[in-house]
Image (tube, rainbow, N blue to C red):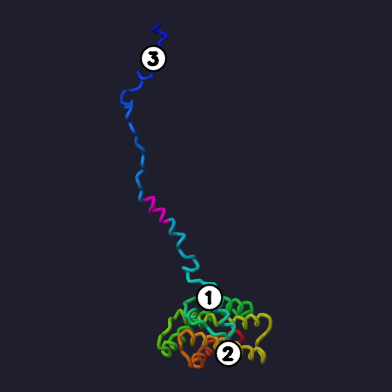
């Protein structure tokens, strides 16, 4: 009878592991981790950041509007857009001008960049003397660079045929007038210089005339 008797399970359980019958239990509540919430808010902040092109100041819509304003000298310019310091289009047009001159057999990259820098400084000094509100050097470089687009068209024509003749000279004069008219119109709109367009167009025509000489000769 002693062999058949089964041991009681309670005899093998330690007494400290036995819970009283009135034990209500306790739920585990994890403590709040401040580092986790800080990291989550840091990750969520990436969605609220502006696009990279906007941080770099590259706005394709404004670039397109400025290009259309240059291509149509009779179109009124938006002074709020034209007063921006946007150098994406000017750098692109300067490189395009140098590339088209190179395709025409004229390696004039140094002259293009040098004339651009000296011309921007000269027009910047002149406009600060003429305008009461003043203008930034970046704005001057932006406007003069965008208005270089018709000169790129002239240099593209020089790839296919020579401009050293009556037709080439007439085309160069038209392009210089086109560039200077567009630049003076934009400066007049951005700086509120009503009635001074011809005074602004004259130094711009001298600058673009130098680029025309590089293109024709």
- Residue at x-position 38% and y-position 16%: 8
**Image location of residue 216, percent across then percent down:** 62, 86
**Image location of residue 64, percent across then percent down:** 56, 76
- Residue at x-position 48% and y-position 69%: 56
Reading the image, the residue beneath label 1 is 62
| Furthest residue in direction right, as rendered | 161
Q: What is the number of callouts on the image?
A: 3
Q: Are marks 3 and 2 in contact (CB under 8 Å)?
A: no
Looking at the picture, tell me which residue is in the foreground, 115 or 178.
178
- Magenta residues (range): 35-42
- Residue at x-position 43% and y-position 59%: 45
Residue 82 on the magenta span: no
Quadrant of the drawing holding the N terminus: top left
Residue 37 on the magenta span: yes
SS assignment at label 3: loop
- Residue at x-position 33% and y-position 27%: 21
| Furthest residue in direction top, as rendered | 1
**Image location of residue 63, percent across then percent down:** 54, 75
SS assignment at label 1: helix
Give residue 23's quadrant in the image: top left
Q: CA distance from mark 3 to mark 2?
A: 113 Å
Reading the image, the residue beneath label 3 is 7
- Judged by its main secondary structure, the magenta piece is helix
Reading the image, the residue beneath label 2 is 177
């Amino acid at each position: 009878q002693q062999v058949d008797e089964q041991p009681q399970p309670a005899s093998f359980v330690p007494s400290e592991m036995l819970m009283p019958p009135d034990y209500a239990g306790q739920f585990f509540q994890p403590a709040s981790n401040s580092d986790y919430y800080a990291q989550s808010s840091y990750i969520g902040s990436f969605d609220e950041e502006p696009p990279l092109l906007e941080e770099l100041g590259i706005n394709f819509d404004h670039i397109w509007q400025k290009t259309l304003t240059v291509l149509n000298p009779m179109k009124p310019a938006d002074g709020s857009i034209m007063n921006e310091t946007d150098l994406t289009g000017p750098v692109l047009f300067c490189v395009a001008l140098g590339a088209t001159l190179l395709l025409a057999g004229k390696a004039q990259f140094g002259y293009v960049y040098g004339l651009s820098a000296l011309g921007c400084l000269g027009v910047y000094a002149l406009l600060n003397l003429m305008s009461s509100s003043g203008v930034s050097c970046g704005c001057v470089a932006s406007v003069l660079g965008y208005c270089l687009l018709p000169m790129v068209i002239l240099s593209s024509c020089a790839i296919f045929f020579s401009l050293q003749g009556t037709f080439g000279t007439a085309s160069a004069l038209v392009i210089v007038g086109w560039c200077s008219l567009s630049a003076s119109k934009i400066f007049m709109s951005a700086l509120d210089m009503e009635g001074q367009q011809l005074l602004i167009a004259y130094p711009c025509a001298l600058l673009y005339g130098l680029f025309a000489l590089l293109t024709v000769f």
